[in-house]
Amino acid sequence: MSEELQGNYRTRTDICLRCPRGCEVQTMLGPDDEILNMSGNKCKLGVDYVKQEIQDPRRVLPTSIKVKNGNRPMVPVWTPEPMPKGLLLELAKDTRKIEVEAPVHVGDVLIDDWRGKGIRLVASGEVTRVE
């Protein structure tokens, strides 16, 4: 995403990720981030994508957490639903403090409701228990 200021208005360019086309969507925003004009999108998905990016940008967080008594020291995890982009670093920092007990299986929910925000952290790898 790139931005350019023009008086009270700003223009931003986003590359839409909703389909393989990767349209470059130019959006002119007013002083209160209202969309004044949008161009470059080949379909409605581009409009929806840019609106989401302006109003509530979200991302999936892939990371890993420590495992005790496992055949591997860490297990890959992710947030299966996109979460607010502004919370990514907080969750990433919190995952450094987490340690789970082996075994861990793909699909295990390791955090069900992070900080009461409805964000889940789910295992995307296997770690077997070793004694």
Image (cartoon, rainbow, N blue to C red):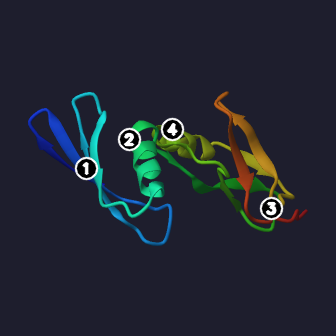
Dots 2, 3 in contact, CB < 8 A: no
Q: Mark 3 — residue?
A: 106
Task: Give the Cα separation between the discs numbered 1 and 2.
Answer: 10 Å
**Picture coordinates of residue 44, whole percent (x, y):** 46, 55
Cα separation between marks 3 and 1? 39 Å
Mark 2 vs mark 4: in front: 2
For the point 64% across and 31% down, which residue is it?
A: 117
Residue that label 1 marks: 12
Q: Residues within 10 Å of mark 4 (few under 14, many from 20)?
A: few
> CB of mark 4 within 8 Å of CB of mark 1?
no
Considering depth in this image, is 67 or 126 the residue closer to the camera?
Answer: 126
Quarter holding the C terminus?
A: bottom right
Alpha-carbon distance for marks 3 and 4?
Answer: 24 Å
Q: Is residue 24 above or below residue 47?
A: below
Q: What x and y, as percent, mark residue 72?
A: 75, 67
Callout 2: SS: helix
Q: Are marks 1 and 2 in contact (CB under 8 Å)?
A: yes
Mark 1: secondary structure: strand
| Residue type, numbered disc 4 | Leu
Q: Is residue 123 above or below residue 8?
A: below
Name which of mark 2 and mark 4 comes first in the sequence.
2
Q: Earlier in the sequence, mark 3 or mark 1?
A: 1
Query: Which sits earlier in the primary sequence, circle 3 or circle 4?
Result: 4
Question: Disc 4 marks which residue?
Answer: 87
